[in-house]
Amino acid sequence: MSATVSPSRLLAFDTLRKVGRGGYASDLLAAASVPLDPRDAALASEIVFGVLRFQAQLDFLIQHYSGRAVSKLDFEVVLALRMGVYQLRYLDRIPPHAAVGQSVEMVKSTGFRSAAGFANAVLRKVGREAVPWPDRAVELSHPEWLLERWDREFGAATATLIARANLRPPETYIRIPPDREIPPDTSVEPTEIPGCYRLVAGEAGRFRIQDIGSQAVVPLLELAPGQTFLDVCAAPGNKTAQALESGVRAVACDFHAKRVGMLRSLGVGVVHLDGTRPLPFGRQFDRILLDAPCSGTGTLARNPEIKWRLDAADIHDLHRRQLVLLRNALEVLAPGGALVYSTCSLEREENDGVIDSLGLTPDRILRRIPGTHAGDGFFAAVLRSR
């Protein structure tokens, strides 16, 4: 690409193009940002997540200013226009001439030089004036089918709170075990969950970044020293590490070989397995955590690309897999033991629907709803051995 395009925008464009092919923005940015100046990396992240969060609004604005539907434009041209419109309307610190000029250069350097004049004309029309949104889905920048699901499950008012929360950058929470001291150059705020702190200023440093919703799950197991603990879908290992603070004897598992490697630094037994098959253990466990693979609709502020690639069929497929995972996990739960089934999904089929399908009665259910509770959305059910 042209050297006249800034490193931050080059990275943002490349990341968005890879997200369009199925990648995840957080992983892509983490891998590619290392050689960049921190300010360039921060701007790239701001543009990528802003474009993904506000994509429906941006596409409507492109059509509003150009008179052409986004579906009629080349994908790379759309990405450059989304980036330009986002900077012009949503980022106060970017000079308009820079947003326009850089976006036009991006169009040229991607091989669509013939579209550069069109892009320039469109972006020069973009202002900060109020534009009436055509419908709620565009205003909230969420797929209509997903909003309708949340309307039915939570009511329209709460569904709107969820969607608006997903348009805001998530706050950062870190895990500080009781035997660790808070560095003097790090400012944190304690939460209602022991060991969970909101990062106010400074860097996380050697502490694990772990959302408050995630940190709320492990305490439901009421762990105690000496208990045997199984984490069925453990990677990247945050919840296993949190469980180890209680003195349990842990085994951590995952399906993906690459993710299994992430668990080895925890100093526990690590098993590479497929949880949809009978678990290969000759013993039972006092406590089990099944943080099941899910749609992730509770994490759309953090992973906004999910809302544009998910469909209802995916949720039904996940439900079937989650049923098998839970059934197999219950088979290795010791008498008198407890299992927590959790997801970072807001969808009934993945949560209560899984529990109900197996005819189980939870001892307790935890729900965390974005816009109502801090952090990501989570569901967790405490199940006792039968």
Image (spheres, rainbow, N blue to C red):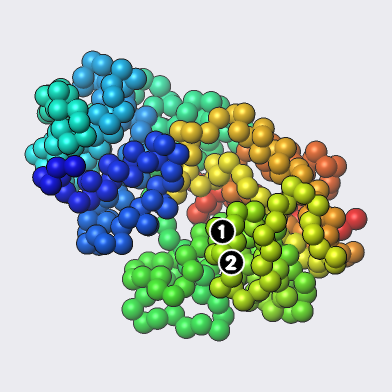
Q: Which residue is nearer to you in this view: 25 or 157?
A: 25
Q: Residue at x 76, y 56 (%)?
A: 382
Using the image as rendered, state which of residue 278 and residue 122 is in the foreground: 278
Q: What kind of element bears circle 2?
A: loop
Q: Residues within 10 Å of mark 2 (few under 14, many from 20)?
A: many
Instruction: Tell me the kind of residue under disc 1.
Output: Arg
In the displayed structure, does residue 310 sit left or right of residue 270? left
| Residue 177 can be seen, yes or no | yes
Q: Establish if 342 lies above or below 288.
A: above
161 above or below 240? above
Q: Amino acid at mark 2?
A: Leu
User: Secondary structure beneath disc 1?
Assistant: helix
The quadrant of the picture occupied by the C terminus is bottom right
For the N terminus, the quadrant is top left
Q: Quadrant of residue 156?
A: top right
Percent x, y of residue 312: 60, 29
* Residue at (70% x, 68% y) in the render: 251
Q: Position of residue 278 (x, y in %)?
A: 81, 52
Left or right: where does residue 4 sit relative to residue 72? left
Residue at 56% across / 80% down in the picture?
A: 178
Label 1 and label 2: CA atoms lie apart by 7 Å
Q: Are marks 1 and 2 in contact (CB under 8 Å)?
A: yes
Q: Which mark is residue 259?
A: 1
What is the x, y in percent for residue 26? 41, 51
Q: Quick one: 96 or 34, which is closer to the camera?
A: 34
Q: Which mark is residue 263?
A: 2
Residue shown at the point (56%, 58%) measured from the top left: 259
Q: Point out the residue furthest to the left here.
A: 97
| Res. 348 visible in picture | no
